[in-house]
Amino acid sequence: MSWRLKLKIHRWRPGDRAPHYDLFEVEVPEDAYVLDAIEKVWAEQDRSLAFRHACHHASCGSCGLRINGREKLPCITPVTDYRQGSTVQVDPLRHFPLVRDLVVDMGPLARAMDEVRFSIIRQASEEVPASLPPEPPLLPDETHEATRFENCLECGLCVSACPVAGSSVRYLGPAALAAAERMLAEPRGVDPAAVWAAIDHDDGLWRCHGAFECSAACPSEVDPAAAIMRLRRYGARVAEAARGRRR
Amino acid sequence: MTMSERRARSKGGQAFWWQVISGVLLVVLATIHMVANHFVVPGGLRTYADVVSYIGTPAIFVLETLFLVVVTSHALLGVRAIILDLSPSDRAARRLDRFLVLLGLAAIVYATTLMIRVGW
Amino acid sequence: MTAVQESGQARIGRERRPRRVDRWFDPRGLAPGQLAFVLHRITGLGLVFYLFLHLGVLSLLARGPEAWDRFIAVAKTSPVLALDVVLIFGLLFHGLNGLRLTLVSLNLGVRKQAALFWGATVLAAAGTAVAGWMIFRMGG
């Protein structure tokens, strides 16, 4: 069975005075996702439509959009979430510079992640050991110790959902703060004091007003709001540790 | 001074926790204030004579002064938080802090003076 | 390890972005977190306004009994009593939601934050109804 939707898509290109919406009628299989519908619009109706997509299974975070005003990854949003024949409004993420149509500049998020030291640190080639390190020990059931990867896709949905990120232009944002909490929980060679200094200010941890919209929008169980609440209590431990060092 | 150095000297955490503490205190103080002034008085509002006798009681004067200080602090910390949501420059933020401290002190001094003048 | 040095242009561009205050009041489909934020902000601003209005009105006490008692007569009229009921809701909601924010900031009840918001709203509404009945019964 197929599914018909009317996609009301935000359009803007550099030089336009104001954005406008184009309406596209599209029919896709019932088990398709909203991203499939957008791709079909691009393929069959308007090749000038700009949008991001990559993995199509919620592991790259590229395709983040607002669908009917709420942040979603369209690659995992079934078309059947919207009534047959209904009009679905598709907008770019908020709080990022708009590049074109549905594409935003994710640079501010990358810079915020760098600021809290949440980067992959590339080692110089001469530091690579001549031989591989020993295999990690086997667990009793003969599997190797599990390595926890990060949940965060850096998709930016949380930043878009945050009510203060629009006015508080210097706010680090929920993604970076959640990343900082991970760095403090598991430093990986980073100086925790430096991470704390990067977030303990009026444009960092203390700008959050507890709206929890970031966690509501997160498609990957990062729960940035809970991370920020944990961070608020971290300060007491940092202060106590500093007092201990001064004695 | 770099932006990160300026940020490191900000008062964000202190302001937040004072907001929390004053808020919790206000739950008690505001309840006492509302009940004492509006829900145990016949007609719900104190006449001039009622106000004079109320504020002239030492324990009440201390309680209302404490309420005044706590509510003014909490209100102005809240205003500060909202204005900081607009990402003012560091200079504007320092001026804001100075202005709010002066406004708060002025409000507290004015209202305390009024209470002394009326009740004592 | 060095922090990324943000380009001057990028930083200036960020500082010049318009401040989207409208986003504070965007209902976002009545999402509980956003509703809590909006209501807390509106009641907070309303209470700040009321605080300074109240302090200003209290100056009538310095003018003596006639001035104050004249004001009290106006304060007992229905429109003013109705505004008092709105004030009571603002106080109750802001206080109860504030307690919710205090709890979650202490990492307590974070998983239940939406339920805490609805609970605070219902309690504030119930308290307002009771207070409203008392206000009009006593003062009307």
Image (spheres, rainbow, N blue to C red):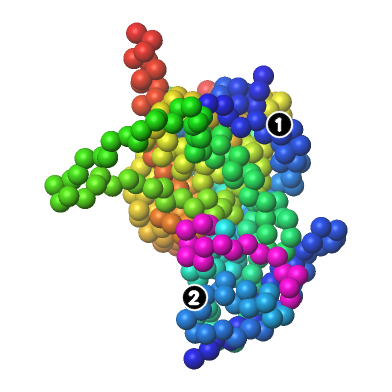
Residue in front for this viewpoint, A103 or A47: A47
Q: Nearer the viewer, residue B73 or C129?
A: B73
Secondary structure mainly formed by the magenta segment: loop
State left or right for residue B116 relative to residue A226. right
Which residue lies at the image location 47% right of the left edge and 81% below the top edge? A31
Q: Amino acid at mark 2?
A: Pro
Where does residue A169 sit, x and y in percent of width and height? 66, 42
Where residue A94 sits: x, y (%)?
64, 56
Chain of the residue on which disc 1 is drawn? B
- Residue hosting label 2: A78
Q: Which residue is mark 1?
A: B89
Name the residue type under label 1.
Ser
**Magenta region includes residue A56:** yes
Residue A109 occupies which quadrant of the picture?
top right
Q: Is residue A166 visible?
A: yes
**As displayed, is residue A27 above or below residue A94?**
below
Q: Report, in whole angstroms, how far the alpha carbon at label 1 lies from the one at label 2.
A: 44 Å
Residue range corresponding to the magenta coloring: A46-61
Label 2 crowd bin: few (<14), some (14–19), many (20+), radius 10 Å: some
> As drawn, is A144 to the left or to the right of C79?
left
In the structure shown, which secondary structural element does the residue marked by tag 2 occupy?
A: loop
The correct choice, above or below, for C1 with respect to A223 in the image is above
Residue B36 horizontal/vertical position (percent): 43, 42
Query: Residue A61, how many percent across, how many down?
Result: 53, 57
> Residue A88 got which mark?
none
Q: Quadrant of residue B20?
A: top left
Name the chain letter of the residue that bears numbered label 2: A
* Residue at x-position 74% and y-position 60%: A100
